[in-house]
Amino acid sequence: MKKLAFLLAVLTVVTIMAVPGFAASGQYYSGYWGVTSNAFIAVDGKVLTLERNPVIIDGRILVAARTTFQVLGVTTEWYPSYGVIEMSKGDKSITMSIGLKVAYTDRSVKYMEAPPILVNGTVMVPIRFVAEAFGENVGWDAKNEIAYIGRQPTEIPSRGGLTNNRTYKVVIDAGHGGTQSGAVYGGIKEKDLNLDIAKRLNGLLIAEGIKTYMTRDNDATVGLYTRSALANNVDADLLVSVHNNAGNSKTTGSMTLYHPDSSKKKGNLTAYEFAKIVQKNLNKTLKSKDMGVIQRPNLAVLRTSNMPAVIAEIGYMTNSAELSKLKTDSYKQQAAEALRDAVLESLEKMYK
């Protein structure tokens, strides 16, 4: 603990000279803006399966610290009370602090081009800085979007079954907006929750190389028919409308709405199949109660869209426990990740 206290003191002093940088768009991560990436990560020729997608901040790739570097024999210690990460191997060690571009290594203070961050409980660190600190070389395969430590991998994994010779188009609809607040409970407006999740989903799909369109990206009033018209006009593959539910105070769970008309089909995917995939991923990722997939033939957005379309009801704002989850960044990010996974699975089935 004496060593940790000393390192904390060093990092605190140097913090005065470390000013966070900001970009114009993206997701907010531990004081910095960045975007999620669909880049593969490989160590010694083997592509890893990591618990989190990499994040790019200031052009630098950040990866899950423990699961990436344990392959190299690096031990990672995380001190959440202090926001400090200590990584060590043999006589080499690095000490970093979440959100700071300074590190203590080789008995000296060094500066990084991107800081370590925390994403839904996972410590993410700049891959190049950490690898080189432990004497490893880092490379970038631009063609296959693979960052690798050591040997370059020869086997390239599939990206969720999607091919590179097709432009996939998805319309993301943040329900309500502007003068239409939707449900309001505990001082929280549904329109704001919907937009937050929709924007997160947008970033995730862009990182997957999917062409996206948002019916709104701010607090604007958008007509019901305008939403489906956008999807029809761009000939979208899928339409995802993000909503949250209201009911009695004891009801919790996720549900997915769809139009039963068999003409709401594209390729090999029907609206019903799309709804089932969305519902499955919401329940799996959020651990929410399965409220099922429900036919709603009279809802304008679903009725007037030409492609498979769903309204994803993420959770119940009227349930205090569920609303508490919906208010957190981590839960909204998980909801967006569940919808991303559903979209990828659905597109794969559509064009299989």
Image (cartoon, rainbow, N blue to C red):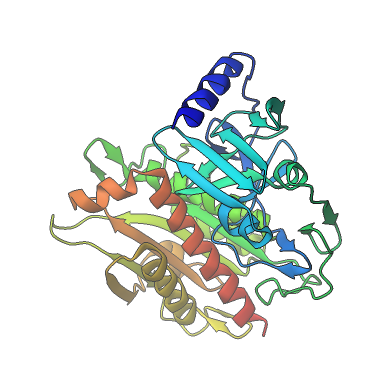
Q: Taking 179 as reference, is 326 above or below it?
A: below
What residue appears at the point 45 percent right and 68 percent down from the top-left corner? 310
Callout count: 0
What residue appears at the point 18 percent right and 58 percent down from the top-left corner? 247
Q: Nearer the viewer, residue 67 or 351?
A: 67
Image side of residue 19 versus residue 129, left or right: left
Q: Taking 308 as reference, is 221 above or below it?
A: above
Quadrant of the image containing the N terminus? top left
Q: Quadrant of residue 209?
A: bottom right
Q: Position of residue 331 (x, y in %)?
A: 39, 51
Image side of residue 251 versus residue 33, left or right: left
The answer to whether any part of residue 206 appears in the image is: yes
Q: Position of residue 203 (x, y in %)?
A: 60, 50
Q: Nearer the viewer, residue 269 or 280?
A: 280
Q: Position of residue 82 (x, y in %)?
A: 43, 32
Q: Quadrant of residue 169?
A: bottom right
The answer to whether any part of residue 240 appears in the image is: no
What residue appears at the point 37 percent right and 62 percent down from the top-left corner? 286
Q: Position of residue 164 (x, y in %)?
A: 79, 70
What residue appears at the point 67 percent right and 85 percent down from the top-left corner? 352
Image side of residue 293 versus residue 251, left or right: right
Q: Nearer the viewer, residue 182 or 122?
A: 122
